[in-house]
Amino acid sequence: MKPIPGRSLIIYALFFLVFGYGIYFVLGFGKSLETSPPSVSTETVSISDFSSVVSELGKNSKSPVAMLVLQLLAILLAARLSGWLVSLIGQPTVIGEIIAGLLLGPSFLGLFWPEVSGFLFPKESLKIIQALSNVGLLLFLFIIGMELDLSVLKKKAHDAVVVSHASILFPFFLGTAFALTLYGDLAPKGISFLVFGLFMGIAMSITAFPVLARIVQERGLTKTPLGTLVITCAAADDITAWCILAGVVAIAQAGTFAGALITLGFALVYVILMVFAIRPLLGKISEMYPSKEALRRPVTAFVFLVWLISCYTTELIGIHALFGAFLAGVVMPFKEDFRRMLMEKIEDVSLVLLLPLFFVSTGLKTQIGLLNQGNLWLVCAGVISIAIVGKFLGSAIAARLVGQNWKDSLAIGALMNTRGLMELVVLNIGYDLGILSREIFAMMVLMALVTTFMTGPSLDLLNLKFFSGAKEEPSDYRKILLSFASPASGTRLLELINFLFPESKKKEQQTEIVALHVTSSGDITPREAETLEKEVFAPLEYKAKQIGRKFRKIYKNTPQVSKEILSKTKEERASLLLMGRSQSLFSRKGTAGKVGSLVENSPVPVGVLIDKGFKKIQNVVLLFSGNRDFFLREYVESIAEHPNREVTVFWSGSVPPKWAIPKKGQKHKWKFVQKLRSELFSADWSSYDLVLTSWDFYKELESTQLEEVLPSVLVLTE
C-alpha cells in the first residue's frame, strides 16, 4: 500500500512542533541557571558589529587550516595552468609544474609582489608545506618503484648496462672535476670536498625515468628497438644512481668513511631483507587477492605499513627515507593488476594534490636573483654545459659503440639527458643536508629545467627529413587514417571503410588502414596508457576480424588532440582522414568543435561520418549541388562497382554533370534524379542507408530541418 503524502507531512509537522518546543523549553530553563551576563547580545545591529565581523573574518583567514587551504588552491591552480601552457608547445607537464613553483617563490612573486608572497606563504606555514610535500614525495617515489619493471633489464641487458653506466660515469667524472672550481667560493662552509664532489657527480648523472618513459610512450617508441633499449637503460640508470646516492648520503650523514661503511652495511642487510623476505610475502598476498573486489582495506593498509616502515628504517639507517619509499615500490609483487590497483589508490592524491607542494617547496628555496652577483651566470652556464655534454654525449657515444646507428644513438643521448623531477628530488636532499649552497642549488634547478626542456626539440631535430629516409608511396596506393574518439565510433568507421573501399586482390588498388586514438590528457602514466590502448582498440580488433580486414594502430596521449591528429595525418602521408562527428560546448552541429578545425587545417581530404545508426549500407544517395562537388565522382564510381550496391545521384544544379549521365549504349551504374533543393525536404529518405555530400553543401543544409530526416551522412572534402 502506497503511503499517503499528506500523512507524511502531518507526521513531520508533529515531530517538528513537539521537539522544537522541547528545545525552546530547555534553552529557556537553562538561561535561569546563568550566573554571569550572557555573551550574546540581542540589541540592534550597529556598524561597529559589522566591523567586528569583518575583523573576525580577517582573523579566520589567517588560521592554519584556512591558510593551508588557500595555499593549496593557489598551488594547484598555478601548477595546472603552467602545465597546460607548456603542453601547448609539446613539453611535459612537469616542466610547467616546476616553473609554477619558481613563479610562486622569491624569484618572481617574492620579487615583484613581496606583500602577496608574505601573506600567501608566511614563514610559520612553510613547515606544514614542507611536511606535506615530503609525504607527497615519499608516495611519488613509491609509485616510481612500482612503475620500474625489472623484467625489462633482461632485454638487451648487456647493451643497456654499457650505455647506462657510461651515462653515469662520464657525467659523474665531469661533475666531480667541475666541483674543483666551485668548492672554494660556492660550497657551504664545513662540507668536505669528498661529500661535495661526490654529490655534484651524482647530481650530474641523474636521468628522470618517469619523464623519459612518458616521452617514449607519447612518441610511439615503446615497442620499437630504440624504445626498448632506452627504457632498459633508464631503468638500470635509476637503480644504479639511487644506490650511489644512498652511498653519498651515508658518507654525508656519517661524517667519516668508516661510519659510512657501517651505514652501507646496514643498508645492504635491509635491501636483502626486503628482496628475499618481504617481496615473497607480498607475492603470496597478491595471489590471495587477485582482483579489485578482493583487494580490501586490510591489504591496502598492510601495503602502506610496509611503505612507512621502509621509509622509517632507511631514514633511521641514514640513507634517507626516499630510498626506503623507492625500495618499497620495487619489491611490490610483479603482477601488473596488483600494482595497477595499488597505484590507482595512490596516484591522484599524491601526483595531483601533494606533489605540486614539492615544486613550490623547491621554488621557495630557489633564489635565481642570487646569480646576479659577479660571474655566477657564467658559472651557471658552465653547470648546464657540463650536464649536457656529460649525459648527452656519454650516452650517445656509448650507444654508438655497442652498435646503434647515429640517429638512434643521438636519440638515446637526448632521452637520457632528461633530468626532470628526479633531479629536483636529489637536489632537495643535498640542500636539506647542507651539501649545496643556495647559489649552486639555484643553478642546478635551472639545469634540470633546461635539460628536460631540450629533450623534445632535440628529438624533433633528429626526425627531420634528412634523417627519416621515408619512402614515397605509389600514387595509386590508398592509405586511410581512421581517427576515433570512442571504440564504438571506431568500429563504425571501420565498417564504413570496408564498404567504401572493399579489399581488392589487385596490389595497386590495396587500401591500408591506420587507426589512431588520442587520449586528451598528458598526465597519464605509461602503464595507464598501455592499459587504455588495449581497451580502446579491442572492439576494433574484434570487428576487423569479423569483416576480414587488417589495420595498424597508433595510440597517443596529449592535451592537443587536433594538433596530434594533423601531425599524424602528415607523418603517415594519408590519402584520406576519416573521423566521426563532434560537438562543441556551444553548438550541436556535427561540423563544429574539433571537426571544423581539423577540416580547415588538414593537408589531405577529410571524411566526417554523421552516424545515425545504419545497420547495413546497400542504398546510397549522393547529393550533388554543382561543379564544386565534382570530386565526389571518385567515391560514387568506387561504390557503384560493387554488385550489391544501389547508387542514386540527386542533382540540384541547373546544368547536369556530364559524368553522371551515362553515354548512349553504356550500362547504367547509378540512378540519376534531378531534385531542386526545396524538393529534398519532401523526399522519402527511409529507403536510403547512407548519404554522401560535400562539406560545403552539408554546412548549408545542417541548419535546416533536412538534417533531422536524413539517414547517416558521410561528409567529404576535396
Image: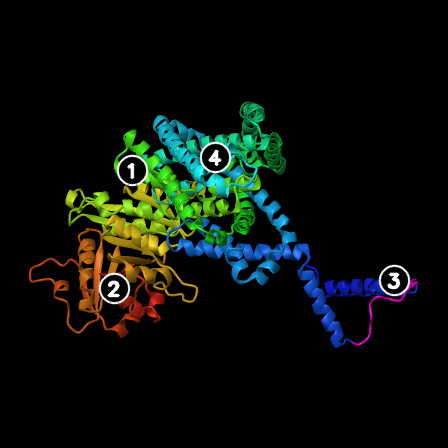
Q: Residues within 10 Å of mark 1 (few under 14, many from 20)?
A: many
The structure residue drawn at horizontal position 40% and vertical position 65%, both measured from the top left corner, is 588
Which label sits in the foreground, 1 or 2?
1
Closer-to-camera residue (405/506): 405
- The residues colored magenta run 33-44
Q: Residues within 10 Å of mark 4 (few under 14, many from 20)?
A: many
**Side (left or right) of 221 relative to 147:** left
Q: Quadrant of residue 320?
A: top right
Task: Residue under label 1, please give it.
Answer: 408
Q: Label 1 is placed on what type of residue?
A: Asp
The structure residue drawn at horizontal position 12% and vertical position 66%, both measured from the top left corner, is 658
The answer to which of marks 1 and 3 sits earlier in the sequence is 3
* Mark 2, secondary structure of its residue: strand
Cα–Cα span, label 4 and label 2:
69 Å
Task: Residue under label 2, please give it.
Answer: 694
Cα–Cα span, label 1 and label 4:
32 Å
Could you say where residue 54 lies in the image, as x and y percent from the top left?
Answer: 70, 69
Could you say where residue 389 lies in the image, as x and y percent from the top left?
Answer: 35, 40
The answer to which of marks 4 and 2 sits earlier in the sequence is 4
**Side (left or right) of 473 relative to 326:** left
* Mark 1, secondary structure of its residue: helix
- Disc 3 vs disc 2: Cβ atoms closer than 8 Å? no
The structure residue drawn at horizontal position 42% and vertical position 37%, both measured from the top left corner, is 175
Placement of 304 over or under 712, stated as above or below: above
Closer-to-camera residue (7/570): 570
Could you say where residue 612 lies in the image, as x and y percent from the top left?
Answer: 36, 58
Cα–Cα span, label 4 and label 3:
75 Å
Q: Residues within 10 Å of mark 2 (few under 14, many from 20)?
A: many
